[in-house]
């Protein structure tokens, strides 16, 4: 599946349902496909990240698909394996847990919750921690 397969802006095509978006997230992470992942977000999406570097009082907030794409470019360029361990999709909402592992064994875990509109992610919050 490529970014064009995501159905973003395809005339005459029904908007993807939350379960389909979740499956595309899985595919994007596991294939390290930054373009596919970014295509799932609305043009004006907000992606909030909380981790040890960005605590809840000062989270990192990425605004807009281009900014989010930059984050995925960086993430997908790293030599690590990604997998979604669990995910749920409901009425215009989804949540998932992802686990990443670097070649040296360092692990990263992220829990994300997102809301959708028009088949695209509008808001996502991710809580992330990693081995020291």
Image (cartoon, rainbow, N blue to C red):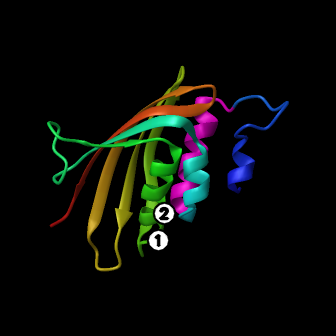
Distance, label 2 to label 1, CA atoms, is 6 Å
Vertical position of residue 8 compared to residue 101: above or below: above
Q: Which residue is mark 1?
A: 77
Which circle marks residue 36 in the picture?
none
The image quarter in which residue 35 lies = bottom right
Residue range of the region highlighted in magenta in the rendering: 16-30
In-image side of 106 versus 125 (left or right): left
* Magenta stretch holds residue 35: no
Residue 81: % across, % down? 44, 68
Residue at position x 70%, y 40% from top? 8
Residue 40 image position (x, y, % from top left): 58, 42
Q: Are marks 2 and 1 in contact (CB under 8 Å)?
A: yes
Total residue callouts:
2
**Residue displayed at 53% across by 60% down:** 30
From this view, report whether residue 73 is shown above or below residue 127: below
Neighbor class of circle 1 (other Cα within 10 Å; few <14, some 14-19, many 20+) is few
Give the image quarter of residue 19.
top right
Q: Quadrant of the N terminus?
A: bottom right
Where is residue 82 shown, x and y percent of the image?
44, 62
| Horizontal relation, residue 88 to residue 43: left or right | left
Residue 18 is a magenta residue? yes
The overriding secondary structure of the stretch rendered in magenta is helix
Question: Relative to 114, is 30 on the left or the right?
Answer: right
Q: Residue at x 29, y 79 (%)?
A: 104
Instruction: Quickly name the residue at label 2.
Output: 73
Quadrant housing residue 58: top left
């Amino acid at each position: 599946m490529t970014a064009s397969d995501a159905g973003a802006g395809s005339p005459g095509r029904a908007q993807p349902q939350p379960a389909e978006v979740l499956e595309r997230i899985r595919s994007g992470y596991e294939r390290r496909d930054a373009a596919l992942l970014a295509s799932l977000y609305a043009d004006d999406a907000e992606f909030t990240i909380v981790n040890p570097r960005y605590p809840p009082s000062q989270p990192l907030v990425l605004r807009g698909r281009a900014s989010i794409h930059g984050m995925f470019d960086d993430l997908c360029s790293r030599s690590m394996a990604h997998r979604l361990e669990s995910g749920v999709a409901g009425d215009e909402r989804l949540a998932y847990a992802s686990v990443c592992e670097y070649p040296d064994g360092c692990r990263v875990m992220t829990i994300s919750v997102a809301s959708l509109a028009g088949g695209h992610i509008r808001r996502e919050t991710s809580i992330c921690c990693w081995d020291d």
